[in-house]
Image (cartoon, coloured by chain):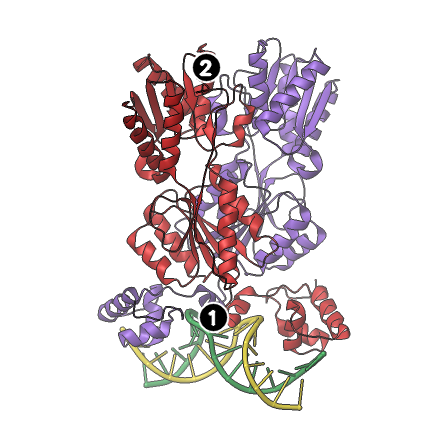
Chain colours: A purple, B red, C green, D yellow
Amino acid sequence: MSRQDHRPLTLRDVSEASGVSEMTVSRVLRNRGDVSDATRARVLQAAKRLGYVPNKIAGALASSRVNLVAVVIPSLSNMVFPEVLAGISQALDETPLQPVVGVTDYSPEKEEKVLYEMLSWRPSGVIVAGLEHSDAARAMLAASGIPVVEIMDTDGTPVDAMVGISHRRAGREMAEAILAAGYRRIGFMGTKMPMDHRARKRFEGFTQALARGGIEVADQEFYSGGSALAKGREMTAAMMARTPDLDFLYYSNDMIGAGGLLWLLEQGYDIPGRIGLAGFNGVELLQGLPRQLATMDACRAEIGRHAARIVMARVAGHVVDSHVVLKPVISRGDTLRRG
Amino acid sequence: MSRQDHRPLTLRDVSEASGVSEMTVSRVLRNRGDVSDATRARVLQAAKRLGYVPNKIAGALASSRVNLVAVVIPSLSNMVFPEVLAGISQALDETPLQPVVGVTDYSPEKEEKVLYEMLSWRPSGVIVAGLEHSDAARAMLAASGIPVVEIMDTDGTPVDAMVGISHRRAGREMAEAILAAGYRRIGFMGTKMPMDHRARKRFEGFTQALARGGIEVADQEFYSGGSALAKGREMTAAMMARTPDLDFLYYSNDMIGAGGLLWLLEQGYDIPGRIGLAGFNGVELLQGLPRQLATMDACRAEIGRHAARIVMARVAGHVVDSHVVLKPVISRGDTLRRG
DNA sequence: CTGAAAGCGCTAACAA
DNA sequence: TTGTTAGCGCTTTCAG
């Protein structure tokens, strides 16, 4: 308790305590350049004894190297994004790079602010969800001079690199599978679109493919906020009351799909005979449901890993393929009849 | 496209472009000190035209002020922690302070590393989940000279400040409610304890209170990894097969509780007559279940908000109560008989 | 209201 | 293998 622990320790303190120059202390602490074992030991011991923690702010300024990767996502409560994040972290582990997360709450204005904040720390790269950004945000990204990877969606033109799936295609393929299975009276439930471009694109692809089969969505409903599981129940109940002859329900995410599934089972519906169901994302949660909901894996972890690898490669000065379109696969579960 | 956009812009660029000294440009950009409207306008215009983004690294070094709050939590996939985080963000909004998240995966070693990393950015404060840390971690926190708030648990001694609930007490109260409701053959399911101190403490409080009522846990099982919902199903099925006369199941979290609930309903168990259930956390998900699971709110968002406020107050130099024990309340839902 | 000078704590580059 | 000298881009401080 003798230290007036208010001035944080500096390299100089370690230097004085060990009788080694600041420069050499710095070398030891970063494992850079050749340092004799004797000196190294003395430095390490002094640093540990004092409890020295290097100041990365100063280090970053001096070296103009900031080993951070900005990750900008709409939400943390959606499960989907933490999984992407896990993929990123995993790929970045064993690398000096570290992810730093910013959340936009699906708001373009907030996204712009968050990007500005993050870029002002001069990160080594940016990974951002989606292809839709304000003009200012796109300009900032383009001008940043660092690798920018837009993830999760590939229906559009990226500022720089992109990794994801085509949600339009995902919607289309699900529609085709549903039609092939013989369903014809189809209802749709999802989030209010303006907020969620990927859900919108899935819906567009979906209706487009239905139209090609001469079918229109027979009923639809959109929600925002609240417990997704509960919303799924409520919307499903309301929709079945309103349009009792529906024979299929397509949900824009698995969570509301799970809610709908639970409600329908309670009501004694024959699934997938009387009515079929499908969601989207392939969330782990589904594995605990009484029936396996049909869904489509959004390749979340893989997208994260891939995006991180692109940043890593670019930082290392490599040239890499920067337009990666993953192909999600339908899993029919127990709620979508075999074609 | 004329700019060789490889050297990031500096204050000097804005200064030259606007014909105003760097110092004054800096003042304008930070809204500090008096600047004439004319100059301000010229500076702002130049900055915007160039697309200047300030360098916070340099700013932080010069001012030795870093408006970051390090938030260290075990996991992002647990739902509980994103909610705490939301509380923190909410309280920090409208403040210059910004949260930066680090994840430990419930590993003390990783926690130590993450803390070290974060402290090396010289944040204005630290919020860390739990009271259990390695000696080195505690030492680092104590020596950091910044406000440290340990959250979510109050059964122990904090390095500095703490905000949370007593999990021992939470377990105890649930046990008392269960006994009061007349249940006697009680099973417990939860995560493997060494990883999760809070779950352990709840279990300790629980068994202790049962013992006081002359009762022992009749069966118990612990899991790790996998989909919690699925685990809840599996464990419940296994336990009911093993110990069919159980009349109550206490789950260490709502997710496995929900899995158990779904399974029991499918099997046609009379709930809460034949068997009662309770979980822990009060997660929003429960609202979509066919029955409302009895649970106990862990006050997540409030803990986050409170912790953030303590940091804010301390940063502002105020003295505040730094041992805050919240009192969670049992919600009986549909799965715990009225006493 | 505006500007000039002197660092913040560290590392690149060079010298010894 | 080790030390010395200049900054990194900004803000603090003090002078106009």
- Label 1 packing within 10 angstroms: few (<14), some (14-19), many (20+): few
Q: How many marks?
A: 2
Residue A318 locus on image (x, y percent): 50, 54
Q: Is residue A318 visible?
A: no
Tag 2: amino acid: Ile
Q: Secondary structure at mark 2?
A: loop
Residue A138 locus on image (x, y percent): 67, 52
Tag 1: amino acid: Ala
In the figure, B247 relative to D1: above or below?
above
Q: Secondary structure at mark 1?
A: helix
Residue B107 locus on image (x, y percent): 34, 44
- Closer to us: A18 or B307: B307
Q: Residue furthest left?
A: A38
What's the distance in space between the residues labelled 1 and 2, CA to CA? 65 Å
Q: Quadrant of the N terminus of chain A?
A: bottom left
User: Which residue corresponds to the image point at 55% horizontal and 57% vertical from the top-left?
Assistant: B97
Residue A20 figure quarter: bottom left
Q: Which residue is mark 2?
A: B271
Circles 1 and 2 on the same subunit:
no
Q: Which residue is mark 1?
A: A62
User: Which residue corresponds to the image point at 52% horizontal and 22% vertical from the top-left?
Assistant: B292
- Closer to us: B332 or A147: B332
In the figure, A48 relative to B175: above or below?
below
Q: Quadrant of the C terminus of chain A?
A: top right
